[in-house]
């Protein structure tokens, strides 16, 4: 009897200690549950964490990470990563945009169907550089081909035309879109239905519209004045159609006078660029003749004749 009572008292003490341990564990980990098994030795308490709470915590952390990534501020204007996005374009996209600038369709808008609100500066930059270089080289070759048969012609390369062509092309490709973007922003504030593209989209449209001038400048090497003017008019008409089909949806809801004047000015400036390049870079330069010095004439007396001098 005494041994049975001792065993019961020992079991009650162990159970009480087990209860205290479980209470302490629950106090430290509120989301945990205790599992007491008869197979385990007495006094052993296992702790099982609530996996549902852990999964919820992981989901919350993932949501916070996604929110932080979405709220990440865009890079600063003066950083390299800001401008890197405008040159993030592959060769296929550039060729596709060049093809659409050469084949304008009335049913397709260059910004919406070609750029798709993702303008780039890679294509316009290299198109302007190629046009300026081609214009200067073709001008020098045209001068040489026109006067190489003249014996008195002395040719010297005119390197300053590279600078003049580069300044002219890049100023046109940046200043005209800047003025056009500012005018559209002003008209957008006046009329609610007047739309406007972003500045980079307008620059991109003008840059790709100049591509047709590159083969035109090369073909201007043919010394036929009528053919040169025909090619110039064709290039202006084709590239001007790209500009008209692009900007007409923006200004058609404006007044007729403003819409007509704006489109006329756009086409006139585009044609003025071609005409100015034709007259400055492909004009017939006067040949420079080499001066020939002549020896002074001497009076020749026939043989047998004598000089007589008059007596004073």
Image (cartoon, rainbow, N blue to C red):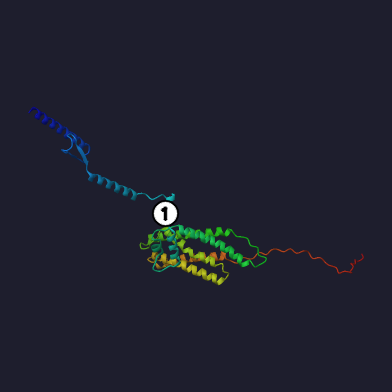
Residue lying farthest top?
A: 2
Q: Is residue 186 left or right of residue 220?
A: left
The answer to whether residue 262 is seen in the rendering is no
**Residue 186 image position (x, y, % from top left):** 40, 59
Q: Image quarter for residue 245?
A: bottom left
Residue lying farthest left?
A: 1
Rendered view: 63 above or below 21: below
* Crowd rating for badge 1 (residues with CA inside 10 Å; few <14, some 14–19, many 20+): few
Residue at label 1?
85
**Residue 200 image position (x, y, % from top left):** 43, 58
Task: Name the residue rendered at 46%, 68% in the picture.
Answer: 238
**Residue 179 image position (x, y, % from top left):** 45, 59
Quarter containing the N terminus: top left
175 and 130: which is toward the camera: 130
Quarter containing the C terminus: bottom right
Label 1's element?
helix
Residue lying farthest right?
A: 311
The answer to whether residue 146 is seen in the rendering is yes
Q: Image quarter for residue 291?
A: bottom right
Q: Is residue 20 left or right of residue 58?
A: left
Q: Is residue 261 left or right of residue 156?
A: left
197 and 144: which is toward the camera: 144
Count the numbered circles shown.
1
Rendered view: 26 above or below 178: above
């Amino acid at each position: 009897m005494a041994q049975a009572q001792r065993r019961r008292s020992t079991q009650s003490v162990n159970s009480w200690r087990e209860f205290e341990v479980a209470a302490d564990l629950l106090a430290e980990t509120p989301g945990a549950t205790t599992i007491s098994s008869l197979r385990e030795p007495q006094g052993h308490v296992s702790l099982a964490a609530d996996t549902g709470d852990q999964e919820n915590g992981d989901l919350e952390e993932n949501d916070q990470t996604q929110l932080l990534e979405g709220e990440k501020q865009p890079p600063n204007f003066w950083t390299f990563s800001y401008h890197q996005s405008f040159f993030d374009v592959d060769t296929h996209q550039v060729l596709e945009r060049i093809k659409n600038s050469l084949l304008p369709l009335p049913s397709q808008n260059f910004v919406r169907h070609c750029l798709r609100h993702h303008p780039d500066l890679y294509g316009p930059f290299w198109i302007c550089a190629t046009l300026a270089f081609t214009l200067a080289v073709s001008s020098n070759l045209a001068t040489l081909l026109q006067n190489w048969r003249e014996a008195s012609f002395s040719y010297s390369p005119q390197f300053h035309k590279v600078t003049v062509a580069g300044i002219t092309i890049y100023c046109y490709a940046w200043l005209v879109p800047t003025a056009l973007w500012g005018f559209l922003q002003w008209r957008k504030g006046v009329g609610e239905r007047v739309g406007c593209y972003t500045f980079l989209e307008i620059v991109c449209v003008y840059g790709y519209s100049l591509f047709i001038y590159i083969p035109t400048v090369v073909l201007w090497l043919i010394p036929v004045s009528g053919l040169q003017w025909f090619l110039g008019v064709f290039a202006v008409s084709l590239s001007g159609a790209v500009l008209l089909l692009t900007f007409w949806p923006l200004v058609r809801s404006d007044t007729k006078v403003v819409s007509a004047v704006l489109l006329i000015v756009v086409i006139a400036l585009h044609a003025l660029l071609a005409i100015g390049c034709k007259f400055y870079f492909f004009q017939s330069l006067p040949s420079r003749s080499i001066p020939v010095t002549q020896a002074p004439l001497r009076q020749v007396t026939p043989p047998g004749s004598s000089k007589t001098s008059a007596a004073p």
